[in-house]
Image (cartoon, rainbow, N blue to C red):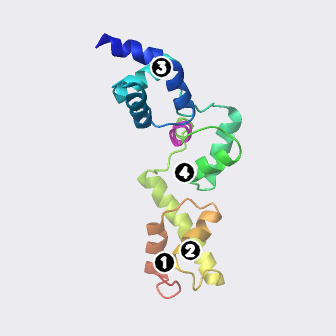
Amino acid sequence: MASQDVSIDDMKEHIINWARTNARTDEIIRRLQDEWGIRTSRRTIFRRLDEWGIIRRPQTEDTPLLRASIAILFRLNCTDAEMLEELIECGYKTGLTGVTRIRIQMGLRRRMSVFDRQARDAQLFEILKAELDEGYLEGYGRRHLYTYFKKRGQLVTRYCIFHIVLVFYPFNIYL
């Protein structure tokens, strides 16, 4: 069986080329089997690529500019997936796990304590009351209402908005 390990090392250039052309591991295993009769496991391919220094996942380069972009997008209430899409569009090479890791390291968490939530709900109630009294939100549907607050930078859940509206203004919003 040791000859199979030597055979894999002999196929190093082919395996590296396939990996660099974004071939999936299952595809590499199939090609080794079909073209050279070499049977191997996924773990062996992963281990060898690691030994050979081939990185298949984008490595996030943690820079101050990237951190600032993540902070701005977080304040605009973007989800991690939306942040990733925007960052890739701006030319950053990163993945979803990298964006999430940096955001959490910066202390930008989406959860709030009970006291913070109560203060936030009181603030939201005042905003909703002012906007509804002026007639801006009258007739809005649930999706439009949530989008309206998200675009204005209000970090709030859909449930919270609808609960306040249903309790205090049940006839002004179409749910």
Find numbered disc 1 in the image and state the secondary structure of the residue it sits on: helix
The CA span between labels 3 and 2 is 58 Å
Task: Write down the residue under mark 4.
Answer: 81
Q: How many marks?
A: 4
Residue 95 picture location, percent across and down: 55, 40
User: Which mark sits nearer the N-terminus, 1 or 3?
Assistant: 3
Q: Can residue 54 be seen in this view?
A: no
Residue at figure coordinates x 56%, y 74% from the top left? 145
Give the vertical position of 49 relative to 162 (above or below): above
Q: Left or right: 44 with respect to 80?
A: left
Q: Which amino acid does label 2 sit on?
A: Leu
Q: Which of marks 3 and 2 is in front?
A: 3
Q: Main secondary structure of the magenta part?
A: helix
Is 17 situated above or below 27? Answer: above
Determine the CA span between mark 1 and mark 2: 10 Å
Q: What residue type is labelled 1?
A: Val
Q: Where is residue 107 in the image (x, y as percent from the top left)?
A: 54, 39
Judge whether 134 appears above or below 125 on screen.
below
Q: Which mark is residue 165?
A: 1
Range of residues picked out in magenta: 96-102
The residue lying at 49 percent from left, 25 percent from top is 15
Q: Tell me which numbered mark, 1 or 2, is placed earlier along the sequence.
A: 2
Q: Name the residue under label 2.
A: 145
| Disc 2 secondary structure class | helix
14 or 131, which lies in front? 14
